[in-house]
């Protein structure tokens, strides 16, 4: 598997001071995977771009919500590597953050097709497909993309060995399409760590996200060279916490807003859709103190990017922000 490195590793781990509770809290700064554009999609894209190049493809086809970070990351790094990036966009609740994301993606020269409903996305995707296209799945989550987080877990194992942090009892991370949680669980199994993965669901129904993440972990395990027995053990490391979703995907929550303020005071950048909800869960875990050592895995980019010029959004795209 050819991987095209995009990020700078290892990303730092830092203690989070001044939070109320009995557990220690550390943060894994995957917000800083790249100074160009960080977050968790960078590690996945290294494998996708590698596979696309190996297969001789010139165009990347992908799908996501209109404010998706995966779409932004694919746009930025795809442009840098000389791929045409073709994206099918579906609706999500309007927010300043989502709008900023789609502006960024568009300013990187993507070809965008607006799709008015999730249920129609497979048909729109089919219409865009072709032999020149390499398909990157929703959220960049399949067995290949998740290998980026097997690497990430092994990177953390080295940081634990080097004394940068105590071995975490749990990693708390936002759970969407599941590749991040699944890859981490497989990596922790490989490294024979005790660490479990709490995936904080960011859409309904939470249990379905958990099932998908565990299934994915089992297949990532096979890809990463684990026996089927160890792959199942890896899958069982993933738990889902459905208490933080609120109204649904892309809607902010009270707890998330509070967690964002606490994060800002500790120098941690968060977004309303994913990481605010996951950090709220981490703060709650520290307060309850059931797990002595908690690691919050930050997955949103904190790279300073100049805002793209404020042009009118194409009508079809603007209508997806509702
Ligand atoms: C995509 C994304 C996630 C979810 O990761 P999955 O691997 O899809 O579960 C979490 N946080 C942020 C900021 C994301 O953009």
Image (cartoon, rainbow, N blue to C red):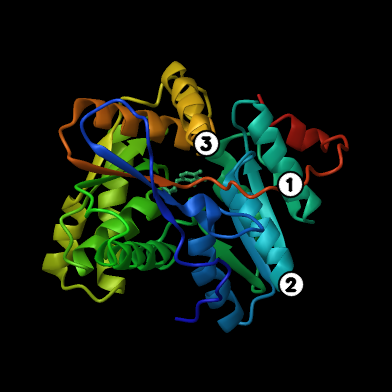
Q: Name the residue under label 2.
A: 82
Alpha-carbon span between mark 2 and mark 3: 30 Å
Q: Measuring 63% from the left and 39% from the top, which residue is drawn there?
A: 67
- Do callouts 2 and 3 mark residues in contact (Cβ within 8 Å)? no
Q: Residue under circle 1?
A: 104
Query: In whole angstroms, how far apart are the C-alphas of marks 1 and 2?
Result: 17 Å
Closer to the camera: disc 1 or disc 3?
3
Label 2 vs 3, first from the N-terminus: 2
Which quadrant of the rendered structure holds the C terminus?
top right
Secondary structure at numbered mark 2: loop
Q: Residues within 10 Å of mark 3 (few under 14, many from 20)?
A: many
Q: Nearer the viewer, residue 205 or 305?
A: 305
Q: What element carries label 3?
A: loop
The spot of residue 193 in percent (x, y) is 18, 61
Secondary structure under badge 1? helix
Q: Does the residue labelled 1 lie within 8 Å of ligand 1?
A: no
The verdict on label 3 being within 8 Å of ligand 1 is no
Q: Is the residue 182 above or below the residue 52 in the image?
A: above
Rendered residue at 25%/26% (across/down)? 287
């Amino acid at each position: 598997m050819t991987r095209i490195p995009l990020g700078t590793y290892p990303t730092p781990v830092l203690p989070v001071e001044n939070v109320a509770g009995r557990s220690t809290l550390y943060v894994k700064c995957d917000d800083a995977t790249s100074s160009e554009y960080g977050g968790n999609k960078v590690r996945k894209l290294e494998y996708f771009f590698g596979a696309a190049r190996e297969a001789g493809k010139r165009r990347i086809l992908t799908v996501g919500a209109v404010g998706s970070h995966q779409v932004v990351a694919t746009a930025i790094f795809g442009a840098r590597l000389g791929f045409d990036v073709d994206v099918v966009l579906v609706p999500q609740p309007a927010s300043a953050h989502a709008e900023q994301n789609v502006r960024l993606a568009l300013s990187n020269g993507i070809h965008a097709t607006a799709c008015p409903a999730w249920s129609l996305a497979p048909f729109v995707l089919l219409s865009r497909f072709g032999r020149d296209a390499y398909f990157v799945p929703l959220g960049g989550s399949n067995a290949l993309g998740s290998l980026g987080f097997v690497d990430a877990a092994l990177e953390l194992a080295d940081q634990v060995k080097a004394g940068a942090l105590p071995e975490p009892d749990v990693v708390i991370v936002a759970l969407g399409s599941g590749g991040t949680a699944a890859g981490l669980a497989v990596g922790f199994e490989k490294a024979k760590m005790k660490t479990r993965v709490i995936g904080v669901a960011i859409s309904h129904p939470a249990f379905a996200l958990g099932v998908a993440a565990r299934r994915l972990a089992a297949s990532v395990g096979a890809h990463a060279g684990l026996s089927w027995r160890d792959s199942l053990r890896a899958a069982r490391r993933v738990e889902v916490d459905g208490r933080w979703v609120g109204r649904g995907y892309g809607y902010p929550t009270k707890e998330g807003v509070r967690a964002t303020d606490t994060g800002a005071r500790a120098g941690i950048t968060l977004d309303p859709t994913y990481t605010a909800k996951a950090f709220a869960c981490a703060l709650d875990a520290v307060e309850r103190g059931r797990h002595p050592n908690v690691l919050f895995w930050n997955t949103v980019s904190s790279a300073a990017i100049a805002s793209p010029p404020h042009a009118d959004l194409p009508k079809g795209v603007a209508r997806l922000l509702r």
